[in-house]
Amino acid sequence: MRAYERLLKYVVIHTTSDESSDTVPSTDRQFELAKLLAGEMKHLGIEDASVDENCYVTGHIPASKGCENTPKIGFIAHLDTAPDSSGENVHPAIRENYDGEDIEIGNGLKLTTAMFPHLKGLKGRTLITTDGTTLLGADDKSGISIIMTMAEEIINSNIPHGRICIAFTPDEEIGHGASLLDLDKYGADFAYTVDGGPENEIEYENFNAAKADFMIKGISVHPGDAKNRMINAALIACEISSMLPSAETPAHTENREGFYHLTDIKGDVETAEIDYIVRDHDAAIFEARINTLKMIEKTLNEKYGEGTVTLTVTDQYRNMIEKIKPHMHIVETAKKCIQEQGLNAVDVPIRGGTDGARLSHRGLPCPNLGTGGYAFHGPYEHITAEGMDVMVKVLLDIIKHYS
């Protein structure tokens, strides 16, 4: 079975995660795909395939004869889809021999070469899109499909291979996907997440990341008698925004440039809240950004009274590069295997985070590979069957290299 055929089966299963949930997984619906995958793995011959109580799917392909002492390689993808756009009632559309031009995908939406110049390079391929009403779910059901197809080919072929460790995780899209993976049970020496974009990309550095939430307490009195008495919490929220550099937002930055991203602002005279996510590839600059927010809290409390502004900073993930650098052979091997497919392997700094970042900091070096997909998290999401085929070959080549 080709990888895209698996994708078409998996994307119709609703697995969207929920950031407001305090359960693990955040949505029970992720178990449906998890149980299906464990069953398929057992059918392929992965005897120890299982789903644990937290919705982590794991399984191992034993080393072939003579390869028992070679490195144990892990491959990981995530079950959930992003809550940014609906992942329910997904209806993928297939366009064989795509002509590389603008296309209407439905619901009044178009994929255009002006918006996505890479489309011209997909001419002649089998293009898979949404119907314009939901996301596709290729992030990361394409990664799952690629890993499952690789597993089938390894098991059904005579390719020598070391022990292969497979995991499918819940809740990656809300930052919790790697938190409860049992690394001792998983048993890999190193791993690759298959959760990226174009098939020639490899990612091994990402943002340092934190949430920063300001809670503001105001004093509400009648506006006719407010002089020197009223403290307007909503106006203080606006003041906080004005104290941050206007050019350091996602809309003004690229590559390794960091930012403050206002995600929510709400309130009235009595109470207000203003929430940010903070990102930077450079650890020192990231800490400076956090210190800037702390200085804003201090300054406003001195101005309006202690306790007016309360800042809560929550660390989310750290740049994986410091944990990857001592193990750069896993990056160089992946690059070589990408190049063997006739592609120019490129390093891409992630303007976000992956399971690989958390896993790397937990002691499992884990760069990220592409899937052949584009425009994730929304109705413009698309991928090609041929791009997924290439990634199956890349995984197989990585396995061969270490065997």
Image (cartoon, rainbow, N blue to C red):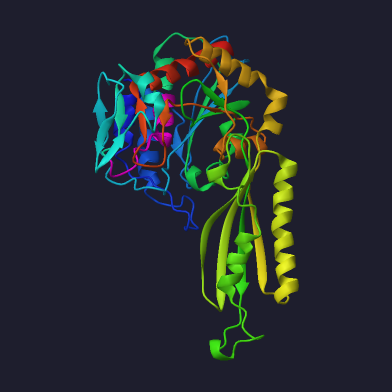
Please tell me whether residue 280 is drawn above or below residue 215 in the rendered image. above
The image quadrant where one finds the N terminus is top left
Could you tell me if residue 161 is visible in this image?
no
Residue at image location 40% in from the left, 16% down from the top: 153
Residue furthest bottom in the image: 225
Q: Nearer the viewer, residue 159 or 385?
A: 385
Magenta segment: 132-147
Q: State the image quarter where residue 227 is shown.
A: bottom right
6 vs 89: above or below: above
Instruction: Examine the image and state in which quarter residue 319 appears.
Output: top right
Is 142 a magenta residue? yes
Q: Is residue 401 above or below residue 17?
A: above
Residue in the picture at 54% in, 46% down: 175
Number of labels in the image equals 0
Q: Is residue 229 visible?
A: yes
At a point 57% along the width and 11% down the height, the residue shown is 401
Tell me the quadrant of the picture where the C terminus can be found. top right
Question: Above or below — where is 287 with respect to 238?
Answer: above
Main SS class of the magenta portion in the image: helix
Tell me residue 152's x, y (percent).
39, 20
The location of residue 75, given as percent across then percent down, is: 52, 27
